[in-house]
Image (spheres, rainbow, N blue to C red):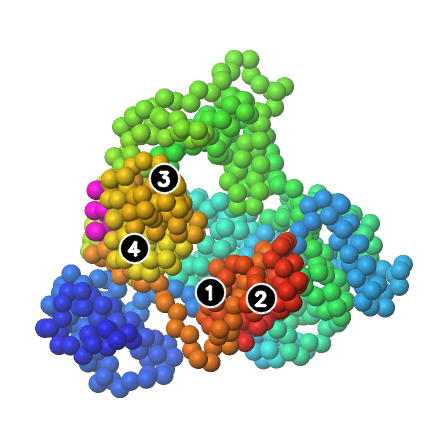
Amino acid sequence: MSKAAKVVAVLKVDDLTERQARAEHKRLGDEIRHHDTLYHDKDAPEISDADYDRLRQRLKAIEARFPQLVDLLSPTQQVAPAPSTAFAKVRHARPMLSLDNAFTDEELQGFFDRLRRALERETDLKPDAEIALSCEAKIDGLSISLRYKDGEFVQGATRGDGTTGEDVTANLRTIKDIPHKLKGRGVPKAFDVRGEVYMERKAFVALNARQVAAGEKAYVNPRNTAAGSLRQLDPAITAARPLRFFAYAWGEAEPRSWKTHSEYLKLLKEWGFRTNPLTRLCRTPAEVRAFYRKIGEERPSLPYDIDGVVYKVDRIDWQERLGFVSRAPRWAIAHKFPAEQARTRLNGINIQVGRTGALTPVAELEPVNVGGVVVARATLHNADEIERLDVRVGDMVLIQRAGDVIPQVLGYVPEERPKKTEKFHFPAKCPCPLRTPVKAEEGGVVRRCSGGLECPFQQVERLRYFVSRNCFDIEGLGGTHIENFFNDGLLKIPGDIFRLPRRVDEIKKREGWGDLSVRNLVASIEARRTIALDRFINALGIPLIGEATAKILAQEYGDADGWLAEMLAAARERKKHPDDVKKEKAAAEVGPSYGRLCNVEQIGVTTADAMCAFFSEGHNVEIIKDLRKQLTVEPVKRRVIASDAPLKDKIVVFTGELSIMTRDAAKARAEELGAKVTDSVSKKTSLVVVGENAGSKARKAAELGVQTLTEEEWVELSRA
Ligand code: IVH
């Protein structure tokens, strides 16, 4: 508990301000829920019944004085315990790495050559001897790690950043392909089984139809759907989704009895797992290529999506010799298939309005099966792209679906162009009810609706953005719900979202809403009343400020009040000095707040000006004020370095591409361990972590004799 919270916890209810009461109400709710779980689910209460009752009485007293704090989530309103609202983090016993890709035959040959060279050099492999490879279909799902202790399933986690994933054990238990207890002999005592959770194409189509009917956003593809289904807060929802699982790898395995990968796959089956039938041990490159072609031919008729074939050196002692380079093993590669394509008729071109008013043309297609998934719409990006492709309504067009990318139109088939077609003319008026003129952006390809803040289409899109995953991440409030709530006046501005819990009766009366879905919605809204500063900034949808810039701003300004005061000051300064300015002179010529903003890493004058324009708009300021009344925006945690921090006083530089962790996560971890992270290498640098494709900094480190680590070594070290 923070110092302030401790003070509030001892104050009499009658002496609390509303702000304090809100915080204390939340704390008590959390504490009571915690004890409920201990008592009901774990049979292990930590406090006496009398102490528990005191917590509930205090909560009730607060609610009697501040009735506005009562919501459906409050323990006073609960019969059954509320669903858990977030997943706990799980650190993988061994990192979950990814695979290098080969797209062309040359790239594949390169892999074969590298393998042979390394194995001849590092093992007793003779020049003409075979290197057996286990070849397996690459399932397009999401990888997970299942922890077994003495043969018993105890925990399951998503890959996350490779080092830490999310604990989705309860949801994984609902998947029937995942055994709860392993049968047969030789199961390692401590064992992580890794594999792919996926959804079959048929199930995806059926689920998506239901999803859309219920007003939720349609999923893009089966993989996306599987991921969404696994991240449900309510395991009952996951259970209703037909997820499947193939096992293909391991993390920790102590003791390990198998010597080859193919032996391991056999054992997995004996122990009760499903392994993919499209697997073969190939001994020569020719066999490997033939297998790849065969799988490619079967691909369209498979019940699930695959995006390539994975080749793995079969002998594990050789795998160990080959080891890892940065993010991926040297002993394996994913040989990818090209994106799936199809032809269909272009029935029309519609214009979609984005949250900043940008207009995007969308191709309305005769529905067509592209590699197992029906596609009816595809993006045409912008007016220039239509011009370049010269596609016209009525054309037969070629479309492509690749991974979770929105389907794209590649071009038209000239022989099949109908006689009378017309070139597409971008409309001069926005399709929104205001029918405002369309503006072409200066120098850019984008066209915009000129309705600005008044445009209802843009308002809806801004609300959608606000609740999206990298912003407030409010589950159960899909795009169609937002649109319907907006049209009926339940939602106009972001702050209205946090007033929805007080309007549950109205929501319950609406079609498609029941007790459970309303409760889940309230739970996900309440869970976001406390939000990190970077998410808060990102959610405001300020032009040019995305997730990455929001993080940088949060780091720079530290807390919401400080940031807001500075942005308002910068906007005022800029209004008084609207002339062209260079960022180096911004502080002197415009003002201190504007100068500071321009000089924040990755910002500069253009982005600073977009920020000032946003903050000069009274409406935007009102929206923020309204939100601030309902939210707790968490300040960025300032670092306090313990005297025994392992990297205290060390100066660390990261260079090249990292892929097990993101650069931000790696930096944050280094800082947690007490290091100072800088960008340039000098004699003072203690450690350089060298990722892939690193350039001059890695060379300089070598010249200066500064210690370097690979990303794997860094991961190992930082776990210590
Ligand atoms: S092996 C250390 N085998 O592909 C290597 N991965 O692009 C571990 N995948 O994250 C991966 N099918 O999600 C392996 N038969 C298969 C696979 C497979 C699908 C996925 C997995 C991995 C990704 C890498």
Q: Which is nearer the eye, 255 or 677?
A: 677
Write down the residue under mark 1.
Answer: 668
Please indicate whether residue 390 sits to the left or right of residue 353 in the image.
right
Foreground mark, 4 or 2, reads: 2
Q: Main secondary structure of the magenta part?
A: helix
Q: Find the magenta span and give its range.
A: 618-627
Instruction: Measure the C-alpha gap from mark 1 to mark 3.
Output: 34 Å
Decide: few, some or many residues near mark 4? Use Cα within 10 Å; few <14, some 14-19, many ≥20: some
CA distance for labels 4 and 2? 36 Å
- Residue drawn 49% across the image and 73% down it: 649
Q: How far apart are marks 1 and 4 (CA)?
A: 21 Å
SS for tag 1? helix
Q: Where on the picture, by quarter, is residue 135?
A: bottom right
Q: Which residue is drawn at 58% across and 55% down?
A: 657
Dot 3 or dot 2, earlier in sequence: 3
Q: Residue 269: horizontal and vertical position, in percent?
A: 66, 67
Amino acid under label 1? Ala
What quarter of the picture does the C terminus occupy? Answer: bottom right
Q: What residue type is labelled 2?
A: Lys
Residue at numbered disc 4 = 563
**Disc 4 marks which amino acid?**
Trp
* Disc 3 + disc 2, Cβ < 8 Å: no
Name the N-terminal-most of marks 4 and 3. 4
Crowding at mark 2 (Cα within 10 Å: few <14, some 14-19, many 20+):
few
Splitting the image into 4 quarters, where does residue 425 fall? Answer: top left
Which numbered disc covers residue 581? 3
Instruction: Identify the residue at image location x=37%, y=47%.
Output: 598
Identify the disc placed on residue 683.
2
Q: Mark 3 Cα within 10 Å, few/some/many (few <14, many 20+)? A: few
In this view, the mark in front (2 or 1): 2
